Amino acid sequence: MGLVERRIGLLFGLFLLLLVFAGFRATYLVAFKGNDLRGRAAQQQVQEFAVPARRGAITDRNGRELAVTEDAATISANPRQIPNPAATATRLSAALHVPIDPLLRKLSDRSSGFVYLARKIDAAKGDAVRRLNLPAITVATEQRRTYPHGTLASQLIGAVGTDGFGLAGIEQSREKVLHGKDGKRRVTSDALGNPISIVDLDQARPGQDLRLTIDSAIQERVESVIADVGRTYQPKGATALVLDPRSGEILSLANWPPVNADRFGDAPAYARQDRAVGASYEPGSTFKAVTISGALSEKLIQPSTLFQLGPTIQVADRTIRESHAGGGGTLTTADILAQSSNVGTVTIGLRLGATRFDKWVRAFGFGASTNVDIPGEAAGIVPRPKNYSGSSMGNMPIGQGLAVTPMQMASAYQTIANGGLMRPPHVIEGDGGPARRVLQPHVAAQVSRMLEGVLGPGGTAREAKIDGYVLAGKTGTAEKAENGGYSKTKYVASFIGFAPARRPRLLVAVMVDEPKGSIYGGQVAAPAFQKIASFALPYLRIPPG
Amino acid sequence: MARAATAAAKPRTAPARTARATAPARSAPSRAPSPARRRSGPAAAPRTAPRTAPRTAPRQPAADSLGQALAARGTVLLDRLLQGRLWVGCIGVLLAGIVFLNVGLLQLNDQIARTDKQSGAIGRENAGLRIRLAKLDSTERIQQLAEAKGFVMPAPGAVRYVHSRAGDARNAARDAVAPQPYVAPVPAVAPVPASTTPVAGPPPAGTPPVTPAAGTPQTPATTTPATTATTAQPAPAALAPTQQVP
């Protein structure tokens, strides 16, 4: 065997040895490590993840955005795969601008293979963490809901939870429209982690924008006014509604105390509730317009009908008194309404009778939902005539013994302002339903004229006038029901009015729950009405009249 | 080495090909002439002479010879093509094409990934701008800024509205006059003495605004400012320019 043949043989042997080694290695990798490697490769190279649909924006009637969606980052970690938790926590702390201790605690807990370090934080911070390229730290892009105006209409708009679903308000009731449809994406990356293939397995469909009938300028003003009421009278709460009586569109719906929409869940339950639709209260004197409208419709009285009234009236076991001194005497129906006479209204209610009274109360929509497109609406409490006690007709005509929502009261006055035609109140553009006639136009006009007297000389809200405009409205001061009776310290002060009285284009309802200091609707709620109307009338370019 | 192998193979294949070529000649009286090379597809069952002979239509000798000639020519061409260097080149080009195609696909995917990332970044920026716009659009904020500059909200009763009547449009059309044709003023180029104090007041009609040349010394201490500043005292409510047609 020559030298050449020996060398060839040596080379052949060497290559054979290498081949055998490669064969054994391949067998080992396939047989023993195959599953693990396959899994790791799939994890590193092919990733399938959900693509959240961009949630639709909520805008006001002029297109100003009240709720928008922006990208956010969620940082998570696998503590079991973190080589040096202390160093990782230090670097993360600097990037996220958070204290190091909570991070270190989470990263050092190896009992779990997954832990959230930060959820839905600013996308810029997420990018900063991504650039650190830390092992076992994952930065996922998510979406979060932002409310640019903070507390503006927060109880109406509601909030979205961490998982992207509406939890309250419009966000909850219009979840299907706003949410859209989440997609699914598969990304294949190369060894360096650069994506080399992006396939949308299921295309994400963004949610639709929702336009409200709310006017953010009026809303801001209304919230500012009831915040003033809150500061002055320190009530438990306050609610204000502004409607266009011609269409039933809600221009503003505000509740005090305010709630920051970005931290909706942190607020107490009372503050979170949209009390314009969810809270029932005894309306008091604002309800007298309903009693008188029924009696006028039944042709039992006229605005000029004279009543000889005493200072009190006895109904069964109950004695009804006037709320102010010097009551009684000879009053017309218009005077009874302007001066808010309890005795006069009960007299008219007794003339109407329980059955017809109940018919008109329900005709105005009390005791049932107004079908307003806001979630959480209460129906109120209106007893049936068969359940009346002997004194029911002594207190129900003056707004006691029944419970209504601010929305129901506003809807009833909208009917009077709109010539007897009730338009369903609505807050989402295009949701308005067909109108329903409740009062004959001449009856609505008669009640409207009588309500003008409330803001005139001798009326209970004469301070609430606005120069150049003829206004109509009604004050209300109701004792709150408590322990089977009526509280002597807790009241609901309210005022509902519209302007201009002869051609109404603006209706404002203000309810103040448990004001301190003054308790009367004419002193607590009527000035708030005046301030709101003073802004809204020129803003909406409503000419005096 | 490959060439030698081909050359060695040639003599062996030649007789076989000859044998295949002559095969149809032997069965010519009873069968139709079969092609020199076998076509792809399932193998046909062998036909027997008594079954096929009566059904076979008689062929013209000229057509048969032409077909054989074409078939033989095609076979030779194909053989030369497969055994020649051109084929190697073709395979090479095809392989290179596949490689380029894959590289192109990878580049395209990389571009898609980058575009997707860019799209996400722009979308995020857009959302941020929308939020900023919404915050800046706050009526309360604008009102506060306006109040800081001395503007006041007119009282509701102070706002007067002009109601249009039926004849207003006709009267307006009657009273309207054609505008004067615009004549560009000749700019004055007379030198201004340094000690002259500029006179404040409205410029004559048609005079373009004069911008002081750069470097011209200003004398703010002796100059009376023009009375067009927006920080003037608020106008009385009765004079508020808010007359509008409803």
Image (cartoon, rainbow, N blue to C red):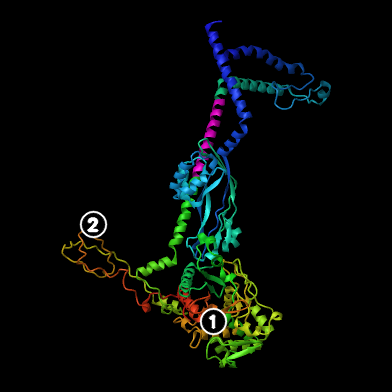
Confirm whether the magenta stretch covers residue B91: yes
> What chain does mark 2 sit on?
B
Image location of residue B123, percent across then percent down? 49, 51
Q: Name the residue that disc number 1 marks.
A: A474
For label 1, the crowd category at 10 Å Cα-Cα, with few meaning under 14, some 14 to 19 and many 20 or more, is many
Image location of residue B215, percent across then percent down? 21, 56
- Classify residue B242 by image quadrant: bottom left
Confirm whether the magenta stretch covers residue A64: no
- Classify residue A24 by image quadrant: top right
The residue closer to the viewer here, B99 or A453, is A453
Q: How many marks?
A: 2
What element does badge 2 sit on? loop
Q: Magenta part of the protein: which range? A: B90-115
> What chain does mark 1 sit on?
A
For label 2, the crowd category at 10 Å Cα-Cα, with few meaning under 14, some 14 to 19 and many 20 or more, is few
Image location of residue A233, percent across then percent down? 48, 75
The residue closer to the viewer here, A130 or A266, is A266
Report whether residue B246 is seen.
Answer: no
Q: Name the residue that disc number 2 marks.
A: B214
- Amino acid under label 1? Lys
